[in-house]
Amino acid sequence: MGALLSRAFAAVYDPMMGGVERAVLASVRRSLLRAASGRVLEVGAGTGSNLVHYAALAAEVVAAAADNDNGAAAAAADGAAPADGGSPAIAAAPAAAGGTGRPPPPFTRLVLVEPSPLMRRQLHAKLDALAATAPALAAAVEVADAALPHLPYPDGAFDTVILFLVLCSVPNVAAAVGEVRRMLAPGGRVLLVEHLPAHAATAPVVAAWQARLAGLWAAVAGGCQLRRETVAALAAGGLDVGGVTEQSWSGIDWGADLFLTRVAVGEAHTDEREGMAPTRSKKFTIMASSSGVHQWPFSASFVAGCAGSKSSSPAVASPAGAAIPR
Ligand SMILES: C[S@@+](CC[C@H](N)C(=O)[O-])C[C@H]1O[C@@H](n2cnc3c(N)ncnc32)[C@H](O)[C@@H]1O
């Protein structure tokens, strides 16, 4: 029965998320992933929904380099072209480096971990498709079959860890956060999108349905916990969550309301950034509706988890916060 449900979840995942992707998630992915650099690990990469964004971002970096330095840029171009349409200059860039196995900038390594063979099959299909437009990236991506909380990488192996809708499903979230922290280099960052439990005070109907359906949902949705306070788990694991904003994506459709009424989006950091006080982040709400996605300031207060910061001025909004479509 469990295997059948896993198969069904993997099969329906992309169609099920289509409306959410179009309304808000694709844009949030792109905005957040702008901060990914260096050695990058994506955990629970699923069907490979981020691949198109990695390709586009790599192409943007190459295009910027071409603007700055025509000669050097040609050498750096590395064959990356935007998979979703983009700069013709990049599409025309030489693909000579396509077989080097080295990813184009801004990445020096890109590892996608995914434990479900059914999800991985779809991921590989997207990678194959990407080979036509971003050969260097497609050749350099490493796909691994592994699961939190035990990943086969040494301490400090990554500069960026990406967790998009993943910590809800891991069996032991505290151990998973510990493992993520172990693999991060000093000054490393976690880029995250994670759903959180609705508040009974502000969304009583959704909170009540989450309480009723939590067990059933976990059974049909790969172990996903509707009532998990993931940001609190990251903070308890010693990460600075000052760069995480709280959003609401309600109104896309009834199914999305069940788990996206409260969403955490942003960056968490290791606390080893020398000389840097923890960042403060502005809380805001995004409301999706049939007429589009709306964003407005939610509160002038700041996330409580920045206790200890000596700075009294708010940080610049997180990448996702800065670029949510209106
Ligand atoms: C809701 S899907 C999200 C997929 C993808 N991150 C995205 O943004 O579309 C959750 C993914 O986490 C994976 N997952 C579940 N438990 C995991 C674990 N312990 N370690 C790593 N990945 C896990 C699942 O196989 C699934 O692909």
Image (spheres, rainbow, N blue to C red):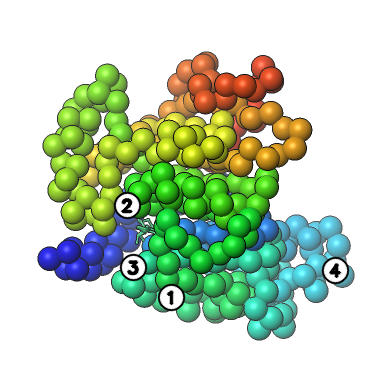
Q: Are marks 1 and 2 in contact (CB under 8 Å)?
A: no
Spatial distance from mark 4 to mark 1, Cα to Cα?
Answer: 32 Å
Spatial distance from mark 4 to mark 3, Cα to Cα?
Answer: 41 Å
Please tell me which residue is depicted at 50% across the width and 21% down the height of the picture: 304
| Mark in the foreground, 2 or 3 | 2
Q: Which mark is residue 116?
A: 3
- Type of amino acid at the residue the image marks with label 3: Ser
Q: Earlier in the sequence, mark 2 or mark 4?
A: 4
Q: Badge 2: how crowded within 10 Å, few (<14), some, or many (20+)?
A: some
Which one is nearer the viewer's eye here, 101 or 149? 149
Task: Say if disc 3 is inside 8 Å of ligand 1.
Answer: yes
The quarter of the picture where residue 109 lies is bottom right
Q: Is 134 located above or below residue 180 in the figure? A: below
Spatial distance from mark 1 to mark 2, Cα to Cα?
Answer: 25 Å
Q: Which mark is residue 72?
A: 4
Spatial distance from mark 2 to mark 4, Cα to Cα?
Answer: 47 Å
Number of on-image labels:
4
Q: Is 209 located above or below residue 219 in the figure? A: above
Q: Read off the residue under disc 1.
A: 124
Please tell me which residue is depicted at 67% across the width and 74% down the height of the picture: 102
Q: Read off the residue under disc 2.
A: 171
Q: Badge 1: how crowded within 10 Å, few (<14), some, or many (20+)?
A: some
- Type of amino acid at the residue the image marks with label 1: His
Query: Residue 36: x, y in percent?
Result: 61, 53
The reply to whether residue 288 is in sight is no
- Type of amino acid at the residue the image marks with label 2: Pro
| Mark in the foreground, 1 or 2 | 2
